Image (cartoon, grey):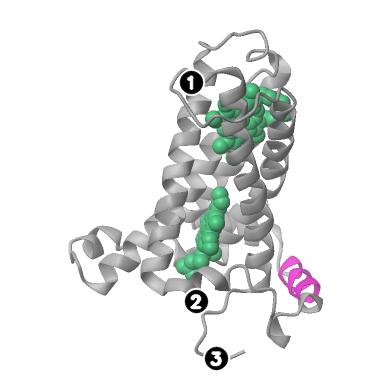
Amino acid sequence: MPASRPYQPLLLRLLHGLTGGCAIAAILTAYWTYTTYDNRWGGLPLPLWRAVEGIHGTFGLWTLLLFPALTIYALRRGQNRLLQTNTADHLQQIGQPIWWYTLHRATNSLMLLALTTALFTGKMMDSTWLPQGELTHAWYYAHLTAWVGLVMALALHLLMSAKIGGRPLLLSIWDWRFRPQDHPRHWWPQILQSHKTWSLDAIALWVQTLTAYKVAEISILLSLAIAWIAPLFK
Ligand code: HEM
Ligand code: HEM
């Protein structure tokens, strides 16, 4: 593999590919669910297919299961691809390369926010509402709005990736070849190594040095946990 080609760590490609694949399947089946049961704002003439709602729910659930791992990766090892503390300064340098890089990082970060919102509002849905013609629930409107937000964020994510790195960057995240040092057999020793350094002191230090990334990580994971628990009390 030529060294000049953009290279994405294998773990990122796995987590991104699985979560992104399920999320895109959820977005497409969501649209079909909308045209089958609702269609108040018009849409493509897709055949009516009532079973698509359950298929959408399944892809949604898979996304919800995988997304915490991508979140933890992105907010730890992938921090340099997300918003940085000097974002405000960089955004003033309009048209400069750093301005484009900052926008690119902003859209990567936006993906985390947009997907969290879609998953959270999805968990608040009730599978009987649409088949019973109940189309005015607040959570249903929130879930529809989250779909629009996610599609717009995804479009920006792709446009900014294309602008920054063109076709090679876009393809690099879906390339399954990897460098020897990135082999999965090295992952477990790395996890064990970091586990050895866990102690009460280390945890206390972790809490003391709360950064924006840690706050974002805790907020996203907490909201996904609430999304699992809250429907049990409906
Ligand atoms: C809903 C689906 C998707 C989600 C939730 C998502 C989310 C993300 C996130 C959070 C990152 C940053 C990772 C990090 O910080 O290490 C990222 C990076 C990236 N994504 Fe996606 N993504 C999605 C779909 C796609 C698609 C369809 C493409 C098309 C090629 C794509 C291309 C990329 C690329 C090239 C990067 C690396 C950017 C860089 O090196 O800065 N993503 N994605
Ligand atoms: C046009 C937009 C959308 C419509 C009409 C829609 C419709 C629905 C319906 C009717 C349900 C209840 C079905 C069930 O629980 O089995 C549901 C649940 C769900 N949706 Fe969506 N959805 C949309 C967008 C999205 C998007 C973009 C995502 C995330 C990528 C998503 C993720 C989920 C999740 C996680 C559930 C919960 C599944 C479960 O608990 O079984 N939805 N959605």
Q: Earlier in the sequence, mark 3 or mark 1?
A: 3
Label 3 residue SS = loop
Residue 169 is left or right of residue 134, and the answer is left
> Which quadrant of the figure contains the N terminus?
bottom right
Residue 104 is left or right of residue 57, and the answer is left
* Pointer 1 residue: 141
The magenta stretch spans residue 194: yes
Residue 171 is left or right of residue 155, and the answer is right
Vertical side of 96 occupied by 5: above or below: below
Vertical side of 136 occupied by 188: above or below: below
- CA separation in Å, label 3 and label 1: 47 Å
Q: From the viewer's perspective, is the residue at label 3 or at label 2 nearer? A: 2
Q: Which mark is residue 168?
A: 2
Q: Nearer the viewer, residue 45 or 194?
A: 45
- Please identify the quarter of the rendering in which residue 180 is found: bottom right
Q: Residues within 10 Å of mark 1 (few under 14, many from 20)?
A: some
Q: Which span is picked out in magenta?
A: 187-196
Mark 1: amino acid: Tyr
Label 2 residue SS = helix
Q: From the viewer's perspective, is the residue at label 2 or at label 1 nearer? A: 2
Label 1 residue SS = helix
Residue 83 in view? no
Mark 3: amino acid: Ala
Residue 224 is left or right of residue 90, and the answer is right
